[in-house]
Image (spheres, grey):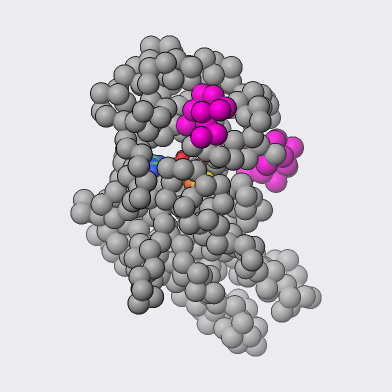
Amino acid sequence: MTEAPLNRHDHFVKLFPKEPAFRLKQIEKAYFTESMKGWEDVTTLGKEMREVLIKEIPWMSCTPVTTLSSKAGDTHKVVLSGNDEQYFESVLMRNNRDQWTICVSSQIGCAMGCTFCATGTMGLKRSLSSDEIADQYRFWKQFLSQRPELPQRISNVVFMGMGEPLVNVDNVKKAIHTWLDYTDLGPTKVTVSTVGVLPVLEGILTDPDWPPVRIAISLHSPEEESRRKIVPTTAPNFHTRLAQWTKDYELEHGNRNHHITFEYTLISGVNDNEEEAKRLVKFVKTTSAVKVNVIPLNLVAGKEFVASPREGIEKFKKVLLDSGVDVTERKTMGSDIAAACGQLALTIKSDGKVVG
Ligand code: SAH
Ligand code: SF4
């Protein structure tokens, strides 16, 4: 069973089928009101209803099992347990505006099997419900409120934790709408990172309910065959269809705040030579003005891949820059607590304890 558990919205409708829609809004608002710590505080609801809710619907869809903080104090990782005791991870990172970016998971494990990614080696356990996704924000808000010496604002959310968001797109969409409705996050502060599930990306173009968030496509190679070696789910004609999609997306949502980024993890001897960089330039020129974000590979236990040397990364970037491609490099954070991109995979010890 890889499906997500029932979300509390649907659970509530099952329990109280005759309640008007505004009731659900009141409830959703309450979850995101920091002074409210449980159903008993939601006094806009009748006492009887509250009593049923206390018994039937947990106030939080997930609870912390362990938290770890990096030495630098700028990255924190939590292992969360769903109410079915399945575990997943979420990361809080200090950003350059001195606020926080949270890196959320959309699934437990991932079925896509990218060869350099720790989550990929777990396989897919199940998808997260929209609540389990949305509550990662609530968890980190609580975490920060218990540490008043730290900045309190979560300014950005990135779907770069465990899982492939577009395989769980309905729950991802619901969670994003919840944040947009009940927190101060705007759509351009949310980035959905995807391995590039083309039918879903294409569906987004005509989906009136798709929120205008930023999209990052994990490209990793300018050509189909070499990409398939590290991203085995690469579809036929991937690059041609993707290039067309970027243009269609720009037509649909086009404004410079809704840009698309290509993520490119640099792996030594695999996709990082200068010829590859030139081919990447060629490909990027066939898309709408897409930016490239290079990611130095983070080490994953048991994998033979290594990061490109600094010199190689600089050379690669220079080829792109010299050809007029907008390129940035992702700063690695939290690698000492295995919280960096691609390092999220749970280790369960023989005594049943979870090591993040
Ligand atoms: N499934 C989505 C989002 C989660 S992965 C996706 O693939 O985009 C988030 C990002 O981390 C992706 O760009 C992914 O390619 C990258 N990543 C995975 N393993 C990595 C590793 N070992 N080092 C650096 N980045 C990695
Ligand atoms: Fe899944 Fe993304 Fe990891 Fe690939 S990189 S296995 S899509 S989480």
Above or below for 191 versus 315: below
At 66% from the left and 31% from the top, the residue drawn is 236
Residue 164 left/right relative to 270: right
Q: Give coordinates of residue 250: x percent, y percent.
A: 63, 26
> Where is residue 130, by image quadrant?
bottom right
Above or below for 304 versus 220: below
Taking depth in this image into account, of 335 and 60 the one nearest to the observer is 335
Q: Give coordinates of residue 252: x percent, y percent.
A: 68, 30
Q: Can residue 325 be seen in this view?
A: no
Is residue 210 found inside the magenta-colored segment of the image? yes
Number of marks: 0
> Where is residue 296, by image quadrant?
top left
Above or below for 128 versus 12: above
Residue 41 left/right relative to 273: right
In the rendered image, which quarter contains the C terminus? bottom left
Q: Give the range drawn in magenta.
A: 200-229
Is residue 58 found inside the magenta-colored segment of the image? no
Taking depth in this image into account, of 354 and 150 the one nearest to the observer is 354
At 51% from the left and 28% from the top, the residue drawn is 226
Residue 304 left/right relative to 246: left
Taking depth in this image into account, of 229 and 177 the one nearest to the observer is 229
Q: Give coordinates of residue 104: x percent, y percent.
A: 47, 53
At 59% from the left and 35% from the top, the residue drawn is 234
Above or below for 19 versus 78: below
At 43% from the left and 46% from the top, the residue drawn is 117
In the rendered image, which quarter contains the N terminus? bottom right
Most distant residue in the right direction:
18
Most distant residue in the left direction:
71
Q: Can residue 63 be seen in this view?
A: yes
